[in-house]
Image (cartoon, rainbow, N blue to C red):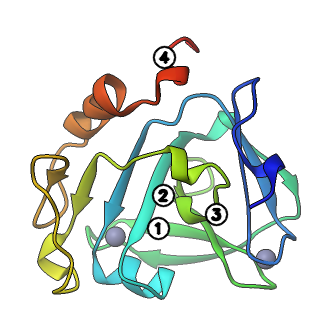
Amino acid sequence: MMDKAKRNSSGVYGGECQCGRIAYEINGEPIVLYACHCTDCQRQSASAFGLSLWVHRDQFSLTKGEPCFWQTLAESGNSKLCAFCGVCGSRVYHAEDHQSGILSLKAGLLGGIRDLRPVAHLWLRSAQPWINIDGHQFLTFEKEPDDYDPLIKRWQQKERPLDLKNLD
Ligand SMILES: [Zn+2]
Ligand SMILES: [Zn+2]
């Protein structure tokens, strides 16, 4: 990934789609990062699991391009709005709707993702059989957690990279 997509000294994370027509920045502290092994995430990522980085919408800004949208139902039955690049098809984020205050970024597009470590693995009951998660290192859930607060707390307390702790 290019340097511009990494976290810079002013605290900005950036990402871009596979073809580069969509790029964005996150100006602030992400809320939580987790891996999801549900069958929806397997399909949308065309891979074994999805990586979800929650951010506040008002800290997210597109710096290039405009995503396309389609709507589906989440496993919970709630409606889910999916933003993607209309050219290369990379999934950019999910949200409940156009107004929701939190975006779930599909974190594989982030340049600095190597510096961030998920705190939890969700929907392990549908994980690929060769996935083997260390339950000491991660919060683990067979399905979706009823409450995301423990994940968020873990992210805030333990898993934040050291250089993020002075930001707020
Ligand atoms: Zn693209
Ligand atoms: Zn999922």
Above or below for 158 versus 142? above
Q: CA gap, disc 3 to disc 1?
A: 19 Å
Do residues under tags 4 and 2 come within 8 Å of each other at their CB atoms?
no
Count of numbered badges drawn on the protein: 4
Q: For the residues marked 3 and 2, what is the alpha-carbon distance in whole angstroms?
A: 20 Å
Report crowding for label 1: few under 14, some 14 to 19, many 20 or more residues within 10 A (C-alpha).
Answer: some
Pair 3/1: label in front: 3
Task: Work out whether mark 4 precedes mark 2 in sequence or the reverse, and give the earlier one.
Answer: 2
Taking the spot 35% from the left edge, 34% from the top edge, the residue there is: 159
Question: Any mark on residue 96, and which?
Answer: 2
- In the image, 80: left or right of 36? right
Real-space Cα distance between discs 1 and 2?
5 Å
In this rendering, position of residue 68 left or right of residue 51: right
Q: Do the numbered discs 3 and 1 sit on residues whose CB atoms are within 8 Å?
A: no
Kindly report which numbered mark, 4 or 1, lies closer to the viewer in this rendering: 4
Label 4 to label 1: alpha-carbon separation: 32 Å
Amino acid type for the residue under numbered disc 1: Lys
Q: Name the residue under label 1.
A: 80
Which x, y percent locates residue 86?
A: 78, 82
Q: Is mark 4 within 8 Å of ligand 2?
A: no
**Which label's residue is closer to the chain start, 4 or 1?**
1
Q: Residue at x 18, y 81 (%)?
A: 126
| Amino acid marked by disc 2 | Glu
Query: Dot 4, crowdedness within 10 Å: few (<14), some or many (≥20)?
Result: few
- In the depicted structure, whether residue 60 falls above or below residue 120: above
Mark earlier in primary sequence (3, 1): 1
Residue 165, label in figure = 4
Mark before the other along the chain sequence, 3 or 2: 2
Do the residues under discs 1 and 2 have CB atoms within 8 angstroms?
A: yes
Quarter holding ligand 2: bottom left
Amino acid tagged 3? Leu
* First in sequence: mark 1 vs mark 2: 1
